[in-house]
Amino acid sequence: MIGILGRLIGFAIVAIFLWFAWFVLAAPGPLGTGVRTDGIVVLTGGPRRVARGIELMQVKAAKRMLISGVDPSVRPVELAVEYKVPQQLFDCCVDLGREAIDTRSNAEETAAWIRRNKYKSVRLVTAADHMRRAQVELEARLDDGVEIVPDGVPVDRPLRPMLREFAKYALRRAATFVGI
């Protein structure tokens, strides 16, 4: 009996290790700027994400962009100055979401924005290692028929934060699998 249990535990450890290797090695990277969607959603919380979204808006990869999780004190003019883009880009085409404080609330804020704008496709911009969990959260809140196009911003993280993100992803994936 212990032999079977030992094999099962060993198999589980190998499976989790392989899943983690896939998580790290096959993380979604940046897409080409030629891919067009109805909207772009940038999740704040890491470097180069907003810059990537602005780059995509400048090449007209979408109609509008939502930056989700913006601090309430940040004004559009400050972002325009920081990223060295005309204020008109923010005036015409960028929405600042100020309600989100974590990945789950990013997904809620984003889903509401997508419904409000009646979008059928959205490019999701976040850190490459955060993409899978962000996608799981967003898919759980969207209606069928909305395409999420991942555009991962490359990150260079040490092993511990990568393991933490993998654990969050695995738990969230399991929770959605059982309907939580």
Image (spheres, helix red, strand yellow):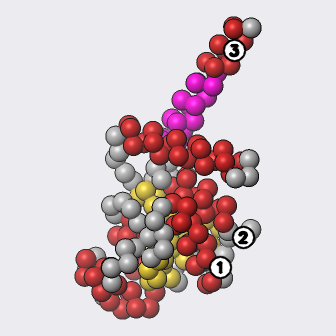
| 147 relative to 179, above or below | below
Task: Tell me, yes or no, whether the two marked residues, 3 and 1, touch with CB atoms within 8 Å.
Answer: no
Q: Earlier in the sequence, mark 1 or mark 2?
A: 1
What span is in magenta? 11-25
Considering the image in quadrants, where does the N terminus appear?
Answer: top right
Query: What residue is pinned by disc 3?
Result: 5
Q: Residues within 10 Å of mark 1 (few under 14, many from 20)?
A: few
Q: Residues within 10 Å of mark 3 (few under 14, many from 20)?
A: few
Give the alpha-carbon distance from disc 1 to disc 2, as whole Å: 8 Å
- Taking 83 as reference, is 155 left or right? right
Q: Residue at x 66, y 75 (%)?
A: 120
Task: Tell me, yes or no, whether the two marked residues, 1 and 2, touch with CB atoms within 8 Å.
Answer: yes
- Taking 99 as reference, is 16 left or right? right
Q: Residue at x 51, y 60 (%)?
A: 103
Q: Residues within 10 Å of mark 2 (few under 14, many from 20)?
A: few
Residue 13 covered by magenta stretch: yes
| 105 relative to 90, above or below | above
Q: Is label 3 or label 1 in front?
A: 3
Query: What residue is pinned by disc 2?
Result: 143
Task: Tell me, yes or no, whether the two marked residues, 3 and 2, touch with CB atoms within 8 Å.
Answer: no
| 75 relative to 158, above or below | below
Q: Position of residue 12 (x, y in %)?
A: 63, 25
Query: What residue is pinned by disc 1?
Result: 115
Q: Residue at x 66, y 66 (%)?
A: 141
